[in-house]
Image: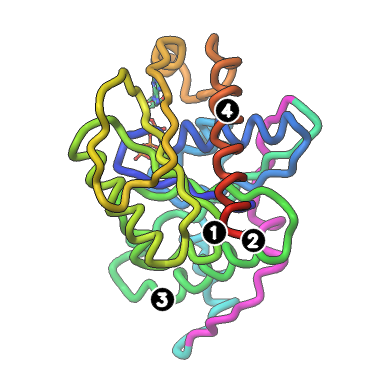
Amino acid sequence: MKIAFAGKGGVGKTTLAAWTADLLARQGKSVWLVDADTALSLGQASGLAVGALPQPLILREDLIRERIGFGVIDLNPTVDDLPEKLCVELPCEGPGRKRLLVMGTVTGAGGGCACGPNALLKALLSHIVLDRDEWVLVDLEAGVEHLGRGTIQGVDALVVVSEPSHRGLETAASIGRMAADLGLENQVLALNRFAGGEIPALPGLPGTVMNLPFMPGLAAKQLADASVLGLPESEQVDRLVMQLLTALATGAKAQAA
Ligand SMILES: Nc1ncnc2c1ncn2[C@@H]1O[C@H](COP(=O)(O)OP(=O)(O)OP(=O)(O)O)[C@@H](O)[C@H]1O
Ligand SMILES: [Mg+2]
């Protein structure tokens, strides 16, 4: 299954993606973590040292030229070998694997035409989805940019993360609508740091909702360490991630029926 995590800035996308990957890997699954964010923090959130991060694909001009070519863009580049070549293995307590691919952002590609990198990125994402029976978790850049570029075509499920505020939920609703327009109907709204209250019924908000409470242990750990793993709340985190995965599996079944 391939799951993308989207939402406004700072809402908890990277945290939830890192938690999900960690539980799946402890359950023995092989997980590809795709960092498609500008902040490049998914590796650190998963416990990787800053110096061990792979170079973002978007900066690998050599590869982009080699696979996409000059002038006329090859829209179907060969990418089979790239995930293995470009990934970094993340520390993992358990029988599974976590491998990190860092895309970097297409909008930061230097002001010129970003068609080449974008084509390579799309091909890479759809290759991992279509040709491998593995889990792929994509941590998207904040906002709606990636949806506009169609990068997530081929994703099976979308987790829209939001703070429980009207403005935040409006962005979440826009993301939900844009994804649905792209045919991505299996969506869950993850309300982060939710302390109760009525959620406004905005058109486009995913119908399935889960709540993530504020976690004091995570906040305390973040003062000293970028990793979001190994928390005092770890058991609670695992239960929440299971709830999320169950909701996404139910959505997938409903769509298949
Ligand atoms: N439920 C929570 N309780 C306490 N702290 C949290 C919670 N969720 C997220 N955080 C903290 O909030 C900060 C922002 O989270 P995170 O980096 O996951 O957001 P993001 O949506 O990926 O942000 P960006 O848009 O910058 O990529 C992090 O320091 C994270 O540890
Ligand atoms: Mg992030």
- Residue 134 lies, with reference to residue 215, above or below; the image says below
Residue at the disc numbered 3: 115
Distance from the alpha carbon under mark 3 to that under mark 1 = 20 Å
Distance from the alpha carbon under mark 4 to that under mark 3 = 33 Å
Quick one: label 1 or label 2, which is nearer the N terminus?
2
Mark 3 Cα within 10 Å, few/some/many (few <14, many 20+)? some
Identify the amino acid type marked 3. Cys
Quick one: label 2 or label 3, which is nearer the N terminus?
3
Quick one: label 4 or label 3, which is nearer the N terminus?
4
Q: Position of residue 37 (x, y in %)?
A: 42, 48
Pick whichever, 43 or 12, lies toward us: 12
Asked whether the residues under the numbered discs 4 and 2 touch, taking CB atoms below 8 Å apart as contact, a structural biologist would say no
In the displayed orientation, state which residue is furthest to the left: 167
- Per the picture, the main secondary structure of the magenta-coloured stretch is loop
Residue at the disc numbered 4: 47
Identify the amino acid type marked 2. Val
- Report the side of 95 relative to 73 (left or right): right
The residue depicted at 33 percent of the width and 65 percent of the height is 148
Residue at the disc numbered 2: 129
The residue depicted at 28 percent of the width and 54 percent of the height is 174
Asked whether the residues under the numbered discs 3 and 1 touch, taking CB atoms below 8 Å apart as contact, a structural biologist would say no
Q: Position of residue 12 (x, y in %)?
A: 40, 33
Q: Nearer the viewer, mark 4 or mark 1?
A: 1
Q: Which residues are magenta?
A: 73-93
Distance from the alpha carbon under mark 2 to that under mark 3 = 21 Å
Q: Which element type, helix, strand or loop, lies under badge 1?
A: loop
Check residue 228 for magenta coloring: no
User: Ligand 2 quadrant?
Assistant: top left
Which of the numbered marks, if any, corresponds to residue 155?
1
